[in-house]
Image (cartoon, rainbow, N blue to C red):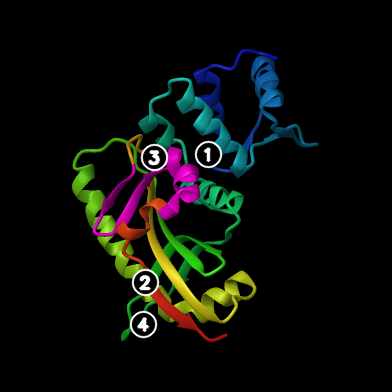
Amino acid sequence: MPEIAIFDLMKILRESKEDNCLNEVENRLGDVLRAVGARKLESGMWEIERSLRIDLALRAVSIGAEIERVVNLMTWKDFEGFVANILAENDYRCVESFRKRGTSETKGMEIDVIGHKGIDIIAVDAKMWGSRTGKSSALKTAAEKQKERTKRLCEMLPRLSEKMGGVASGRYTLTPLLVTWMVEEVIIHDGVPIVPVFNLNSFLQDIAVYEDMIATSTCVYEG
């Protein structure tokens, strides 16, 4: 197996960003692609699936790549998919890019990822941010907006049920959540957890620890 360097990972991410494929790679990079589990198509192109792109991004960060550079090579769909995968690994059913179109009388809304497990529904705003000037203020504003979106989600549980293939009638607890690329500790602003993606799995497993600090909404769905 070839030694896989940051350069290799960044090159794969950069060249597969537009269409999840690479073409005309040199022999060494072909060996790297085989090693990381990429699939070579009959056409000779290499397919880099979204889940693999996320794995490669995390691998690059783990061996020293600058997070900001890695984020610049990702797409928002990559990041949403990664968040959804972590939720799914924790037994949540997920919907990505949940939207309600606005009208002249009502305000539209979009939630990046929604996870449902039992009586719990988590509404995630996936912020693909690395280091940035003014990030603290921007994160606080984003958290406040996500808190309001989550409250409004109560009105849209019938639509969510359709998207998820059925949600049972009952009383649900809705939790707002922000997930970012920033390598920091979990913080809570205005009742909304702001969680680095690297800590998301542990946060979900220990979410009961934060229960008294989170501004959840409760609503009844009659399916």
Q: Residue furthest right?
A: 42
Q: How many numbered marks, from 0 up?
A: 4
* Label at residue 103: 4
* Label at residue 181: 3
N-terminal of the two: label 3 or label 2? 3
Task: Identify the residue position indicated by label 2 in the image.
Answer: 217
- Mark 2: few/some/many CA within 10 Å (<14, 14-19, 20+): some
- Mark 3: few/some/many CA within 10 Å (<14, 14-19, 20+): many
Q: Could you tell me which quadrant the N terminus lies in?
A: top right
N-terminal of the two: label 1 or label 4? 1
| Residue 193 visible, this angle | yes
Give 109 or 62, whichever is nearer the viewer.
62
Q: Distance of mark 3 from mark 2, alpha carbons?
A: 26 Å
Q: Which residues are magenta?
A: 186-208
At label 2, the amino acid type is Ser
- Mark 4: few/some/many CA within 10 Å (<14, 14-19, 20+): few
Percent across and percent down for residue 13 are 53, 32
Is the C-beta separation of discs 4 and 2 under 8 Å? no
| Residue at figure coordinates x 43%, y 55% from the top left | 208
Give the number of the mark in front: 3 or 1. Answer: 3
N-terminal of the two: label 3 or label 4? 4
The image quarter containing residue 180 is top left
Is the C-beta separation of discs 3 and 4 under 8 Å? no
